Image (cartoon, grey):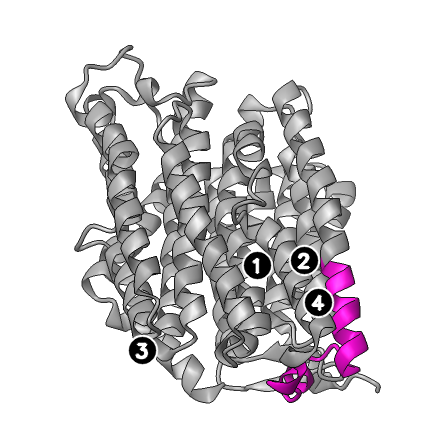
């Protein structure tokens, strides 16, 4: 079927970000001084994409022979990914000083990875979701090792690539089995075969293989081994992009694919996903206790939070769906901010990535100490920060679905996480600084960190401002 002009309008946000990335490659060749303006050009492209996503928000439809959704759910995530991209680029403004990299290539890879995220969240077909996943993943493989002169970065890139390729095999085999049992890869048409299709062993096996592929991308236990090493080895801002945008995109696809089969009540599938959620909460928080490196600590924290998000998704009710989307937004912005603060300290002093290096941060830079404290309190789930509201909705959804054991486990593991989150705050406010070096924060950094901090506080005090949008999305779908 030949695409119409309306099809292109429906996916305008994706096209604009793609065009921005391609134009940057061309302008690099034509204009020698373009490097100075690449950040402005990238951010402008992302802002225009947000504008078109807002325009398309009420226009719920499917495009390109029912391969891609547009409007509501897709637009919601398109806006979120563009915001994550803008924050990442702002926080990467001084990155060239500390790494021997090509700034334009770096921005291009960030933009193309965002294109992959958008395609994943808008995928109406398993094939389009797979294409989006691979676009994003290939960019991440390169970005993980972008600091080519560092051995740890090369190791991170290789580990991520090898394990990612292995996980892709599971994903493709799962798609093949699902197609073989129902004769289609379109998500809506597959859903029309439920619950009968779930009684077929091959179809259930296909869903499990799909689950394994996506579990790798969100780093669910036991598919999490790559994440601490990759986050530690990659440029800190790239780690933030992976933790926020990459994880959110995978969960957006997870909701599209698994919300209906989980709601159909297949006990085997529910038990498998519940065990993955439980293991992630336990392993992420326990291993987080012993981490001295801030990036590894945030990596294990990220693993734990995938478990919390999965609890809401398993519930498959309004509380769960609303809570999952709310938590994805909050966690994404919080992660970008936390890794951003880490990158400021790292950029200024080289490799100050241990917890001890944060001693006396409040005396050297009150702004950074306050922002990091807000992010840590939100990750713990302490009111009045947004993380508390997100966890409340996720756990309330699980109780409604009679998954009380997961809620108890979630609360207990959250208590465990108090140690390593609060330890960082104690070091920042109740320890003397190990050196008296001043920390210089550029205006770009200030804008990005301030935005993240305000969002975490605002959605904690006024969660209805975001929940009203989320409820509107699910009222349509």
Which residue shows up at 74% across the image and 71% down it?
A: 202
**Helix, strand or loop under label 2:** helix
Mark 3: give few (<14), some (14-19) or many (20+) Cα within 10 Å.
few
In the picture provided, is 428 more to the left or to the right than 38?
Answer: left
The CA span between labels 4 and 2 is 18 Å
Q: Is residue 180 magenta?
A: yes
In primary-sequence order, the first of circles 3 and 1 is 1
In primary-sequence order, the first of circles 4 and 2 is 2
Tag 2–tag 1 contact (CB < 8 Å): yes
**Helix, strand or loop under label 4:** helix
Dividing the picture into quadrants, the one containing residue 438 is: top left
In the picture provided, is 350 more to the left or to the right than 382?
Answer: right
Residue hosting label 4: 206
Residue hosting label 2: 133
In front of the other: label 3 or label 1?
1
In front of the other: label 4 or label 2?
4
Counting from the top left corner in percent of width and height, residue 347 is at: 46, 24
Dividing the picture into quadrants, the one containing residue 135 is: bottom right
Mark 4: give few (<14), some (14-19) or many (20+) Cα within 10 Å.
many
Is residue 282 depicted above or below 129 in this figure?
A: above
In primary-sequence order, the first of circles 2 and 1 is 2
In front of the other: label 3 or label 4?
4
Write the start and end of the magenta stretch as one range. 171-197
Instruction: Tell me the quadrant of the picture where the N terminus can be found.
Output: bottom right
Please give the label number shown on residue 468: 3
Mark 2: give few (<14), some (14-19) or many (20+) Cα within 10 Å.
many
Counting from the top left corner in percent of width and height, residue 471 is at: 36, 80
In front of the other: label 1 or label 4?
4
Residue hosting label 1: 250
């Amino acid at each position: 079927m030949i695409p119409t002009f309306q099809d292109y309008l429906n996916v305008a946000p994706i096209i604009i970000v793609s065009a921005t990335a391609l134009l940057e490659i061309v302008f690099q060749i034509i204009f020698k001084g373009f490097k100075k303006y690449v950040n402005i050009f990238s951010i402008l492209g992302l802002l225009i994409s947000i504008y078109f996503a807002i325009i398309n928000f009420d226009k719920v439809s499917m495009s390109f022979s029912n391969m891609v959704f547009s409007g509501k759910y897709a637009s919601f995530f398109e806006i979120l990914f563009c915001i994550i991209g803008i924050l990442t680029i702002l926080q990467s403004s001084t990155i060239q000083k500390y790494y021997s990299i090509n700034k334009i290539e770096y921005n291009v890879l960030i933009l193309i990875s965002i294109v992959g995220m958008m395609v994943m969240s808008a995928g109406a077909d398993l094939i389009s979701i797979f294409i989006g996943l691979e676009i994003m993943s290939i960019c991440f493989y390169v970005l993980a090792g972008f600091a080519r002169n560092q051995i740890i970065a090369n190791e991170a890139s290789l580990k991520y690539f090898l394990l990612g390729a292995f996980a892709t095999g599971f994903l493709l085999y799962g798609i093949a089995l699902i197609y073989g049992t129902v004769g289609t890869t379109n998500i809506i048409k597959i859903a029309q075969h439920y619950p009968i299709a779930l009684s077929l062993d091959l179809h259930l096996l296909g869903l499990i293989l799909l689950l394994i592929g996506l579990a790798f991308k969100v780093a669910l236990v036991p598919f999490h081994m790559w994440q601490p090493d990759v986050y530690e080895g990659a440029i800190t801002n790239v780690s933030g992009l992976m933790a926020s945008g990459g994880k959110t995109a995978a969960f957006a696809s997870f909701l599209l694919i698994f919300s209906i089969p989980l709601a159909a009540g297949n006990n085997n599938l529910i038990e498998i996903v519940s065990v993955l959620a439980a293991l992630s909460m336990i392993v992420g928080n326990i291993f987080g206790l012993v981490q001295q490196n801030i990036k590894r600590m945030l990596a294990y924290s990220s693993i734990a939070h995938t478990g919390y998000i999965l609890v809401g998704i398993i519930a498959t009710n309004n509380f769960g769906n609303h809570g999952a989307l709310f938590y994805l937004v909050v966690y994404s912005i919080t992660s970008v901010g936390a890794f951003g603060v880490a990158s400021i300290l790292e950029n200024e002093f080289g490799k100050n990535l241990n917890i001890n290096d944060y001693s006396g941060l409040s005396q050297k830079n009150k702004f950074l100490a306050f922002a990091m404290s807000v992010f840590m309190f939100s990750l713990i789930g302490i009111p009045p920060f947004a993380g508390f509201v997100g966890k409340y909705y996720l756990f309330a959804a699980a109780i409604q679905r009679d998954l009380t054991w997961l809620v108890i486990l979630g609360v207990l593991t959250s208590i465990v996480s108090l140690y390593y989150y609060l330890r960082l705050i104690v070091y920042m406010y109740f320890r003397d600084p190990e050196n008296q070096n001043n920390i210089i924060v550029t205006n770009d950094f200030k804008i990005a960190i301030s935005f993240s901090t305000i969002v975490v506080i605002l959605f904690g005090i006024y969660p209805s401002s975001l929940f009203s949008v989320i409820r509107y999305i699910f009222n349509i779908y």
